[in-house]
Amino acid sequence: MKKLWVLPLLTVFFILFSSPLHAVINIVNDISDTPWGSFSSLGDFISTLLPNIYILSGIIMFAIFFSGGFMIISGGTTGDAKKSQQGKEAATWATIGFLVIFASYWILQIIKAITGVDIIHPNI
């Protein structure tokens, strides 16, 4: 259960480090033959991928929170303190993951308000 911190940490690093990268690559990458398939640049690829990462991380966070709650209930019913403690840790990490996802989304909204660059929905 202690390895549950890896997912929120990877999500934060990807979101925080890909956001400035998106702006830089859109400026620099004006080459017509890009290796990104149907995307015109790496920035477009990241902007397409980012909302899906938010959805996927939310689903994973919900599943971890749900399984943690189930472990708390089943540990309390059977009297297994270790299982109940593991459930509490899972629920705690899921809550921390939610706060990280929520904070990263609002950081992107602050970047949008300050710079005018919409990283999540650039083509709208």
Image (spheres, rainbow, N blue to C red):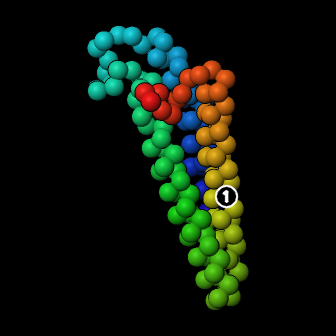
The location of residue 6, given as percent across then percent down, is 59, 49
Residue 63 makes an appearance in the image: yes
Q: Quadrant of residue 83?
A: bottom right
Q: In which quarter of the image is residue 52?
A: top left
**On-image quarter of the N terminus:** bottom right
Please say if 93 is above or below 44: below
Q: Which residue occupies the extreme bottom position in the image?
A: 78
- Please indicate whether residue 110 sits to the left or right of residue 55 in the image: right
Residue in view at x 55 percent, y 36 percent: 14
**On-image quarter of the C terminus:** top left
Residue 21 makes an appearance in the image: no
Residue in view at x 61 percent, y 83 percent: 74
Residue in view at x 70 percent, y 73 percent: 85
The location of residue 122, given as percent across then percent down, is 47, 27
Nearer the observer, 78 or 21: 21
Q: Mark 1 points at which residue?
A: 95
Q: Label 1 is placed on what type of residue? A: Thr
